[in-house]
Amino acid sequence: MAFACFRRLRWVHLAPPLLLLGCLVSMYVLGGMLAKEVRDTAAHGSTQELELSLPNSFDDARNLSLSLSQHLRSHPQSRMLVVLLFASVYILKQTFSIPGSALLNVMAGFVFGVGPGVPLVAFLTATGASGCYFLSGLLGAELLACAPASLRARVTKLQRLIAREKASGSLFSYLLVLRVFPFTPNFALNVAAPLVGVPFSTFFLTAALGLGPYVYITCMAGDTLRTLTEMQQQAGAAGGAAATKMSLADVLDGAAMAKLALLALCLLIPSVLKRWKAGGDAAAGLDDAEVAVADDAGTAVAAAQSDKKLK
């Protein structure tokens, strides 16, 4: 089966490696430009050092953020370069679902502040998720045709669920709740959305708005960490290090998760009330519309399976 899928490769299957290559090249070029700028500054007597690398821990993110913020303080003309480099890394991670977006959110709050950081990260989150959406739209149906029957059955169930929400006019609020809820597997939602008939405009807006509270919490943590770090540096006391000791678990603790879950439940209330007011007659009418939309959403998968049998 795997060999049969390999033989059906077409030019569209080059999209993922080309997108990955584009992100890596942009990161290399922009990172090189920023590193050269720092070296030129050092040549004129500056003692500032900047080591560019992807953060693997909370401490790495804090140290890199501190270096970037200090560089921007003395060289504000470099802000656009730093923003573009940050955007390249973020879109790469979001598109290919590479772990570490929470650390980047903290860095955004540390380097750019909450005001600019939150809308920037929300936009980059939706943009990176859109990259995953389009890749899934290009390749998902054919890959799904090669998938086990149990997985195809789950996708069919999800198609019917999305069809019901479309027919009731509640798809936007439904996806918004899924994004706000802290335990939703966003990667699975990004991949499945084009396969089950979620319109791109709805997908993009719900990703940007629904993940906004999570983005705000993490960016606020980064801004707070910057304030504590600057206070420690001004005090110059070695004992102050314990005051700035934080971890990602402190940012996304139980209280933060509970607040996000409560917000998701609050957003769910209008949809529940709408269905309750609709009554049984409207629910009966939704069944026919649900089947019709689900059949349309499954056309791509069915076509891919038919093509596979012919070959």
Image: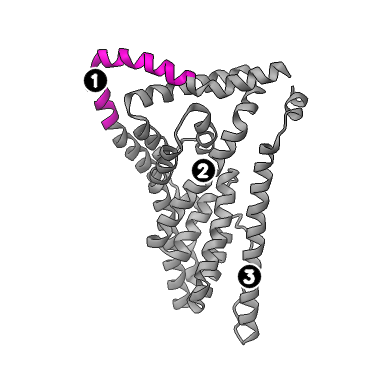
Report the span colored magenta: 270-295
Amino acid at circle 2: Ser
Q: Nearer the viewer, residue 179 or 251?
A: 179
The residue that appears at 46% across and 35% down in the rendered structure is: 184
The residue that appears at 43% across and 15% down in the rendered structure is: 291
Residue that carries the numbered disc 2 in the rendered image: 130
Which residue appears farthest toward the left when viewing the image? Answer: 277
In which quadrant of the rendered image does the N terminus lie? top right
Residue that carries the numbered disc 3 in the rendered image: 33
**Nearer-N-terminus badge (2/3):** 3
Residue that carries the numbered disc 1 in the rendered image: 278
The residue that appears at 55% across and 46% down in the rendered structure is: 94
Residue 136 vertical placement versus 93 (above, below): above
Q: Could you give the CA–CA distance between mark 1 and mark 2, rounded to whole angstroms?
A: 33 Å
* Residue 291 lies in the magenta-colored region: yes
Amino acid at circle 1: Ala
Q: Quadrant of residue 304?
A: top right
Tell me whether the residue at label 1 lies in contact with that at label 2, contact meaning CB atoms closer than 8 angstroms: no
**Nearer-N-terminus badge (3/1):** 3
Which class describes the residues within 10 Å of circle 3: few (<14), some (14-19), or many (20+)? some
Identify the secondary structure beneath mark 3.
helix
- Residue 119 is situated, as x and y percent measured from the top left of the image, at 40, 55
